[in-house]
Image: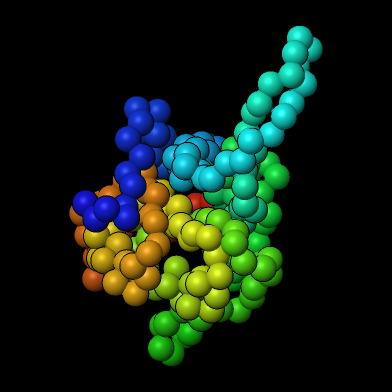
Amino acid sequence: MHPNVHLLDHSLIARAVTVLRDRNTSVVEFRAHVRAVARGLAFQATQRLPLVPVEVETPLANTTGAQLRDSVIAAPILRAGLGMLDGFLDVLPDAITGFIGMKRDDETLEPYECYRNISDLTNAHLFLLDPMLATGGSARAAMRSLPLDRAASHSLLAIIAAPEGIAATLAEFPSLQIYVAAVDERLNEIGYIVPGLGDAGDRLCHTL
């Protein structure tokens, strides 16, 4: 495993991923378990964010606590990434939210950015949300358009990844940190992760 890839090793996350893989899982269950996995990934990915001390008054005494030093931006890659946003915000409800829309060119089949609404990345910790890291094409296209050098850090949270997508993404963005719940065997001939869970966007949006 590449040192920039962080596998979420947790019994309840493994169970949730199994539910997501099942073709018979309802859309309601699918959405709920995507949110649950996203919540677990968010806890893992934010574990070492820099803190600063802060004084607080409890009902009994004054004490020193901690708060985040820098701003945090959670940016789902549309459309499938939207399913992970609420889970991330469950963990960090005051995170700044951004959005990056990606589409695929019908002729070249290459992804391109069609929408962006994201705050200034200067000294912020950016967390991109995308359930499936297959070829890595969408994530890489999204990051190419962002001034990542201004950010304090940049990470990608995915539920399932393929080895090919991990390799291609880290080859282009070697400082990216990837947090993932499962790394699967391979991509098939049409770029789907095997065994995977199918098209996460279709299953989330009930457009199968």
The one of 183 and 93 positioned closer to us in this rendering: 93
Q: Is residue 37 left or right of residue 11?
A: right
Query: Quarter of the image holding residue 113?
Result: bottom right
In the image, residue 142 sits, relative to residue 64, either above or below, namely below
- Residue reaching furthest top? 60
- Residue reaching furthest bottom? 107
Residue 24 at x, y percent in the picture = 41, 40
The one of 170 and 115 positioned closer to us in this rendering: 170
Residue 72 at x, y percent in the picture = 61, 52
How many labels sit on residues? 0
Residue 70 at x, y percent in the picture = 62, 52
In the image, residue 85 sits, relative to residue 55, either above or below, namely below
Query: Quarter of the image holding residue 51?
Result: top right
User: Which residue is found at the position 37% from the left and 70% from the top?
Assistant: 173
Could one spot residue 42 in this view of the protein? yes
Q: Is residue 107 left or right of residue 121?
A: left
User: Which residue is found at the position 24% from the left and 71% from the top?
Assistant: 189
Q: Is residue 11 left or right of residue 101?
A: left
User: Which residue is found at the position 38% from the left and 64% from the top?
Assistant: 175
Residue 106 at x, y percent in the picture = 47, 85
The one of 58 and 44 positioned closer to us in this rendering: 58
Q: How is the image coloured?
A: rainbow
In the image, residue 4 sits, relative to residue 7, either above or below, namely below
Could one spot residue 79 in this view of the protein? no
User: Which residue is found at the position 34% from the left and 74% from the top?
Assistant: 172
